[in-house]
Image: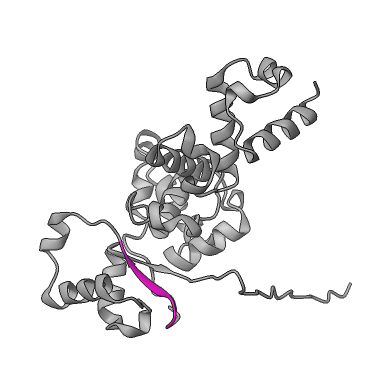
Amino acid sequence: MSAAVEEQMVVKAIREECPWESLPKRLQSTLHTKDEWHRRIVDYCIRKRLQWNTCFARRVYREGEYYEEMMRYLRRNLALYPYHLADYICRVLRISPFRYYCDILFETMKNEQPYDSIPNFTAADALRLTGIGRNEFIDIMNKCRSKKLMWKLNKSIAKDLLPTQPVDFPVEPWWGVCLVNFTLEEFKKLSEEETATIDKICKEEANSYILFDMKIIDDLYKRGLVYFDVPVYTDDRFKVLYCFFLFSF
């Protein structure tokens, strides 16, 4: 069986949520074991950034393990943050877009890869949240390399030069405000106004940014206690704008 044919059969079986026992014999013979079949299921679902509770992976992997494996995959591939999965990634795992992009920037620096190794869309989103673009990236790398022996022995010094909080960026009034699963210690440190705001987020059916004290929400966001949800519905339509440049030679 050719690799292309095998891949088509695997994808079809995954989409149909076919258990190992029901796989065609020739596909079983190429996969060899049930564990290998489960690995292929998880790999496919992760590559497609599918939600655990609506994909086949839910039958072979625990939810937390699935999303942790997905985040490792995305970091390795310097991919965009999976905003559509923020309800678990951000709320439960506490991996915010800001933290995720700082991790990507650090790994790129630690491996001494050039800034251009980060894909364009990932780099643009990282710049939006961290304020680290090409010039800032190069500046940090120059500071690290100037330490010479220390840089060779301890690459983590690059992390100390990355921002500790996201930069300010425009938030649309209709974006939703969502809570993370914060700890008791974090809760104890809240001011009365912040506690009241969090209580309101829990009780309100509508949680649009404009309904709250924006300064309080912004402060909570910078501390990683809330995140923003951009509501998208099935009947929404998007228009991609193209820029054309005229070059003269």
The quarter of the picture where the C terminus appears is bottom right
Q: Where does the image place residue 98, in percent across and percent down from the top left?
A: 40, 59
From the viewer's perspective, is residue 249 above or below residue 70?
Answer: below
Is residue 110 at least partly visible in the picture? Answer: no
From the viewer's perspective, is residue 246 above or below residue 61?
Answer: below
- When asked about the image quadrant of residue 226, the answer is bottom left
For the point 11% across and 75% down, the residue is 192
For the point 40% across and 41% down, the residue is 63
For the point 37% across and 52% down, the residue is 95
In the image, which residues are magenta? 173-179
From the viewer's perspective, is residue 95 above or below residue 243?
Answer: above
Q: Where does the image place residue 194, in percent across and percent down from the top left?
A: 18, 74
For the point 16% across and 59% down, the residue is 186
From the viewer's perspective, is residue 154 above or below residue 116?
Answer: above
- When asked about the image quadrant of residue 195, the answer is bottom left
Residue 239 is left or right of residue 216, and the answer is right
Q: Where does the image place residue 173, in percent across and percent down from the top left?
A: 42, 83
Query: Is 121 one of the magenta-colored residues?
Result: no
Choose between 125 and 155: the one closer to the eye: 125
